Amino acid sequence: MAGIREVEDGDFEAVVRLVSGQGWGAPTERDWRWLWKENPALERIAIPRGWVLVEGGAVVGFLGNIAQEYQLGDQRLTAAVTSGLVVAPASRGSSLQLLLAHARQRNVDLLLNTTAAPHVSKISQFLKFQRIPQPAYDRTLYWVLRARPFARAALRKKGYRDVVDRWCGPVLSALIRAEGVLRRRGPRRLPSRAEFRTIGAGSVGPEFDALWQRRLAEHPRLLAVRDARTLRWHFDDRGRPHPPFFVCASAGSQLLGYVAVVRQDATHLGLARARVADVFVEHDDPEIIRQLLHQSAEHARRTGAAMLEVIGLPQPVRRVIEALRPFELLDEEWPFLYKAVDPALQERLADESIWYAGLFDGDGSV
């Protein structure tokens, strides 16, 4: 029977061996330090880094625990987010211990599981976690940016061999391109009153703090903290070959909004995949959102991405995106679940209009 304890400094190499052994991308020492030493939220939130299952002296399971701050009206809330659940096959009967350890935390306001696999989603709901009431969070929207590599990955996902790809791939990619033109899929360039620029996280400056303060004054929502310091930390490139980027819309010196994009390739399919991590625009202005998505898609395509995905986001933003005719992919189970420690907060969060959830929340874009 595996025992459980909190993650310690000396567990890094054992966790790397465990994760690598299950075919996942293993964390680096830089990732480890970034998550559990450099996170600005840790200045206010004292939580474990996570938990490990130990059996026969070996680490056979791991669950990370990430601190994140939220703002709801004038109230600052603290959250603990699950991340990177992995358990060796022979010990998977003990997985519940890890999720129980996370669920029993009481020194935060919110417990979040934002990227739950189908079996984990079911376990979390058994532990009294609720689905966020934000509609369509289980429906991923996407556009094809490069038809040929996308078609190749689609054939691989269906289990076809490379010889089939050589014959069918060009035909499928031509059909994808033609369908996209006929259906007018994807964001397009339109005249705009704003100026646009693309930057990395290191260039996030005080204009982002000003936008954050203005958005807080619009109306009360549960917003993950997006001050400049947190954004620089969250989207730090950490030496990645395709670092996150921001497309910013400005009028003079005032930032009107931004879209943040991360690269999360499906390496087993050979698919270069970009994902919209955040859309944050003053008053959810549809014109600005459309133009930011156009600029984001163009930059993602130029840097090699074959598709651009959007997950989550509230209805006013999502309606703008759906008007651009993306494809849609349905998840097997609801991936974003929450539990408030205070019952009064739990009741308040049952209101759909409170939420502004996307990949920026939790571990979806880290």
Image (spheres, rainbow, N blue to C red):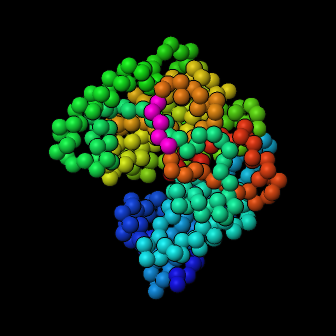
Instruction: Give x and y (percent) for residue 198.
Output: 46, 31
Instruction: Give x and y (percent) for residue 55.
Output: 48, 83
What's the residue at 75%, 47% (across, down)? 349
Instruction: Give x and y (percent) for residue 131.
Output: 65, 51
- Report the side of 214 relative to 198 (left or right): right
Find the magenta span and give its range: 326-330
Q: Residue furthest bottom?
A: 56
Q: Quadrant of residue 73?
A: top right
Instruction: Give x and y (percent) for residue 85.
Output: 51, 64
Q: Quadrant of residue 189?
A: top left
Query: Is 308 or 50 nearer to us in this picture?
Result: 308
Decide if residue 103 is in sight here: yes
Q: Residue furthest right?
A: 344
Query: Is 130 or 80 nearer to us in this picture?
Result: 130
- Report the side of 125 relative to 184 (left or right): right
Q: Is residue 179 magenta?
A: no
What's the residue at 52%, 56% (across, down)? 118
- Report the side of 270 relative to 321 (left or right): left
Q: Is residue 50 above or below residue 237?
A: below
Query: Is 127 or 275 nearer to us in this picture?
Result: 127
What's the residue at 23%, 36% (across, down)? 169
What's the residue at 32%, 26% (across, down)? 177
Instruction: Report the predominant secondary structure element of the magenta stretch.
Output: strand
Decide if residue 311 is in sight here: no
